[in-house]
Every structure is written in C-alpha cells, then in structure tokens.
C-alpha cells in the first residue's frame, strides 16, 4: 500500500532524529544558522511576547525565540515527531530557559485558540506538510492581529547554471551524505524530493497573500537556495 505524504514524512523524521542536527549542518554547510540569525534580526522580536515554532524539530528556533521573548515571554514548539521532540526536550532541559513548552501536534490542525501568538515561525518544515495552504491558514488563524508569521525554507534558485548545480546537489550529493553520515540514504532522498518540488519565492509569496497575510517581505539567501517569507496578519 502506498504511503501518504504525511505517513512518509513522519517515518523519515522518526528515523533520522539522532543525526538531524549534524546533517543540517553538513547539508547547508552551516549556512542555516546564519539564515536564521538574519531572519530573527528582521523579525525584531519584542520581549514579553508569545511565540509558536511550528514543525519545531529539535527546537533550535524555539530556543532562539525563548531567548528573544525573554523570561516574561513564552515560546512554544510543536512537532509531529515524538523522537524529534525528545531531542528538543533534552536541549531545553540543558538550557537556562523556563519559558519553553514543547508539544506534540500537527501543523495542519494547530491545537490553539485564534489570535494566541505574537509570532509564528516555521523553519524548514513547510515543505514536509501535506497541504501548504492549510498550514499557512492555520498559522494565520493562531497569530494575533498585527502579528508576524515567518517561514524560512529551502527555495528554488533561478540563475542559469546555479540552479542546475543546486538540483544536482540535492538529487545526488545530499542523499549520499545521508548514507555516509546518518546511514539513511532513502530518508535523505525523500528530503531532496520535498525541496525540489517546493514553490519558489514568488509562488510562496502569492500563497502567503492567498492565506490572508499582508505586507509580505521576501529575502533570499545564498543564491536563492533558501528564502525567508514574512507576513503580517491584518489588524
């Protein structure tokens, strides 16, 4: 029986969780940390606010948000992989933050009331969701009026030559790295498929608009291999 996208993605992350952080650094040549740092600067997170990190994985962005919102703020991380959350909880336990809560849940049906958070983030997770628009609308629903929803994700380079090199890297090199470093060729082959099929910056910006966001900001990184999309909820 053929697996659904949701079942396949869940199986991937339940298997690769132990090597996920290491592989992120290998695959992106450590650039994902710089991309997130620049994204945080653009978000201008205010102390004392509430944030939600959707598809939080091992909670790196959740931890960064916890530091940004400060002890009077709140940082929630949500993921559908219990194994990924287990690694994230270990990081939280080793940190000095007491304002973090990690929850098991689904990005397409967020277990929160409308208008609950000042910031909602999703980092390298939207491409793994079965329906991008449903997830965007859920994030729009739970963010407060005037609040920000931010997606940092792999994207589609458009420069001739560079795009071909990018696709070659994702199709052949990344799965090979997965086999070499994490003994998970099939799982990293799936991740390249999800990255290859993900919308480009203009297409995703249009999806943000259709989901209800306004004043959408787009920033591409490293020749377009990744992109940040930031949208505001109507006041």
Image (tube, helix red, strand yellow):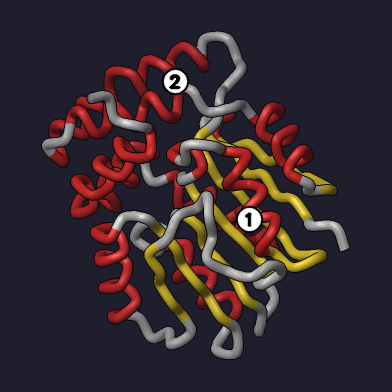
* Image-based side of 210 in relation to 59, left or right: right
Which numbered disc covers residue 122? none
Q: Which residue is mark 2?
A: 166
170 lies above or below 68: above
| Camera-nearest residue between 45 and 211 | 211
**Quarter of the C terminus within the rendering:** bottom right
x%, y% of residue 115? 71, 69
Foreground mark, 2 or 1?
1
Q: Which residue is mark 1?
A: 139
Label 1 Cα crowd, 10 Å radius (few <14 / some 14-19 / many 20+): many
In terms of depth relative to the viewer, which is nearer, 223 or 91?
Answer: 91
- Circle 2 packing at 10 Å, graded few (<14), some (14-19), many (20+), is some
Query: The N terminus is located in which quarter?
Result: top left
Q: Position of residue 9 (x, y in %)?
A: 33, 39
Residue 174 visible in the displayed image: no
Q: Is residue 126 left or right of residue 233?
A: left
Task: Give the residue at x 63% y 36%.
Answer: 220
- Give the image location of residue 98, x and y in percent: 43, 87
* SS assignment at label 1: helix
Q: Quadrant of residue 37?
A: bottom right
Residue 45: percent from left, percent from top: 67, 70
């Amino acid at each position: 029986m053929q697996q659904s996208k949701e079942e396949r993605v869940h199986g991937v992350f339940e298997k690769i969780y132990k090597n996920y952080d290491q592989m992120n650094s290998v695959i992106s040549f450590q650039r994902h940390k710089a991309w997130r740092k620049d994204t945080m600067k653009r978000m201008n997170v205010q102390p004392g606010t509430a944030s939600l990190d959707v598809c939080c994985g091992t909670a790196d962005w959740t931890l960064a948000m916890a530091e940004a919102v400060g002890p009077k703020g709140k940082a929630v991380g949500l993921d559908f992989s219990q194994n990924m959350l287990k690694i994230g909880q270990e990081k939280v336990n080793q940190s000095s933050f007491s304002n973090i809560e990690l929850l098991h849940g689904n990005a397409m049906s967020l277990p929160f009331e409308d208008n609950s958070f000042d910031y909602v983030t999703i980092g390298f997770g939207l491409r793994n969701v079965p329906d991008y628009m449903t997830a965007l609308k859920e994030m729009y629903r739970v963010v407060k009026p005037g609040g920000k929803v931010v997606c940092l994700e792999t994207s589609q380079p458009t420069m001739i030559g560079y795009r071909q090199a990018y696709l070659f890297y994702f199709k052949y090199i990344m799965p090979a790295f997965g086999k070499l470093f994490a003994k998970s060729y099939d799982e990293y082959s799936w991740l390249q498929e999800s990255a290859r099929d993900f919308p480009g910056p203009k297409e995703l910006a249009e999806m943000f608009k259709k989901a209800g966001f306004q004043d959408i900001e787009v920033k591409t990184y490293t020749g377009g291999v990744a992109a940040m999309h930031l949208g505001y909820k109507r006041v």
